[in-house]
Image (cartoon, rainbow, N blue to C red):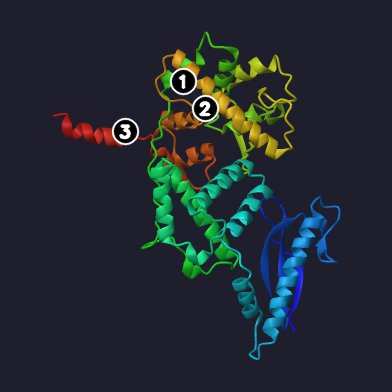
Amino acid sequence: MATVRAVIRKKRNKAGLLPIAIRITKDRKSTFISTGQYVDEKFWDKKNRCVRKSHPNSKVLNNFISTKVAEANDKVLKSEMNPEYQTVSDIKTKIIATKGLDFFAVAEMHLENLKNRNKHHQYDTELGRIKKFKEFLDKDILPFNKLNATVLKKFETFLLHKKKLAPRTVVNYLILIRTIFNLAISESIADRGLYPFGKGKMTIKIPEAQKIGFSADEIQKLENAEGLTEAQQKAVHVWLVSFYFAGIRVGDVLKLKWSDFNDGRLLYRMNKNSKLVSLKIPDKAIEIFNFYREKSNYNGLVFPQLKGVDLNDTQEVSKRTQSITRNLNRRLKIAAKSLGIQKNISMHIARHSFGNISGDKIPIQMLQKLYRHSSVTTTIRYQANFIHKDADDALDSVVNF
């Protein structure tokens, strides 16, 4: 007789939470079915196999777990009535095949995972993309056997021609759908044979994006700027600090604290991937920091934009950072125009500008370290946007006769 229990698995997600699963055991062999829910180990009651009442959502989670256990028990009983021998894998397959999770149900699992990992900006963005997919389909339920290459190609056309989205943005929609489908396969919710991506199906080609950074002369115009408003000058300062530290992201710049600086170095943990970074403080950055140190009253922060925000509230920090970035970009454009800079400017251009000026002067392994890339391949592809000397020399060798 097979038994069904709610348990937590040992492999933590990036937020340090443990997955809640349904364990089916028969003949001393076990298999697990994911519930898509995660919990801190301290909130799990091993004896009663439920979430402790001290958890803020214990009632909802326990009702959900009870429902899943009951559904699994029902399928186990029906399988046990089959005269043919049923392994735990056979039972799991029957449960998965009949539990009715469609694409949008798995999309909810994906969004919940993002929320648990405090990826609030990504959560908001991808929630909007899923809503757009529902708008295109005009339905809230999509079985995986109905999600094929034909549907995806029609959706691509819809985004490109009706919604007038940029090709790179459309690719991001398709990558999200692929991510959700992969999650469904990994959780044994969708059959791998239904996979609509790949050769002869729906292929995702990432279009080349033109990355244009500022020249040294243009950056000097920002460094020597005069006649800017206080708000514009602060925006320029944030941009320059990002540039001086090899293009660190605006969210990381805004959260810099005076305590992050020791022995002439900046030591901070990246928000995007939690990597620990140690960089020398350039003299030019020190000049800007001294300006703010003299008037610092920002709860330990170098820059004032996040003053008054609870930095432990990751969702609030994410929302405020998005709003602040929009304001910074608006003020940067006004400042650049007044300085005679013709190129488009945004906070992200600081990273491209570092790449543009470094060109092929710095060994690729060192650039990988400065950019905080996990793979040197990523660095090579990124830096290729700014290395033109070989192509320029080759062109000159032919036409200059």
Amino acid identity at mark 1: Ile
Residue at screen point 23% across, 36% down: 394
At which x and y percent is residue 240?
Answer: 54, 23
Q: Residue furthest toward the front?
A: 138
Which of pointers 3 and 1 indicates the residue nearer the eye? Answer: 1
**Looking at the rendered structure, which numbered label has been put on residue 243?**
2
* Quadrant of the rendering where the N terminus is positioned: bottom right
Dot 1: within a 10 Å radius of its alpha carbon, few (fewer than 14), some, or many (20 or more) residues? some
At which x and y percent is residue 160?
Answer: 40, 44
Above or below residue 357? Residue 106 is: below
Residue at screen point 61% across, 67% down: 100
- Element assignment for label 1: helix
**Looking at the rendered structure, which numbered label has been put on residue 219?**
1
Q: Residue furthest toward the left?
A: 401
Labels 2 and 1: the sequence-earlier one: 1
Residue at mark 3 to residue at mark 2: CA–CA distance:
23 Å
Could you tell me if the residues under marks 2 and 1 are in contact, i.e. CB atoms within 8 Å? Answer: yes
Above or below residue 386? Residue 133 is: below
Amino acid identity at mark 3: Lys
Front one among 199 and 159: 159
Amino acid identity at mark 2: Phe
| Quadrant of res 265 | top right
Labels 3 and 1: the sequence-earlier one: 1
At which x and y percent is residue 306?
Answer: 68, 27
**Looking at the rendered structure, which numbered label has been put on residue 389?**
3
Q: Residue furthest toward the bottom?
A: 83
Above or below residue 204? Residue 169 is: above
Residue at mark 2 to residue at mark 1: CA–CA distance:
9 Å
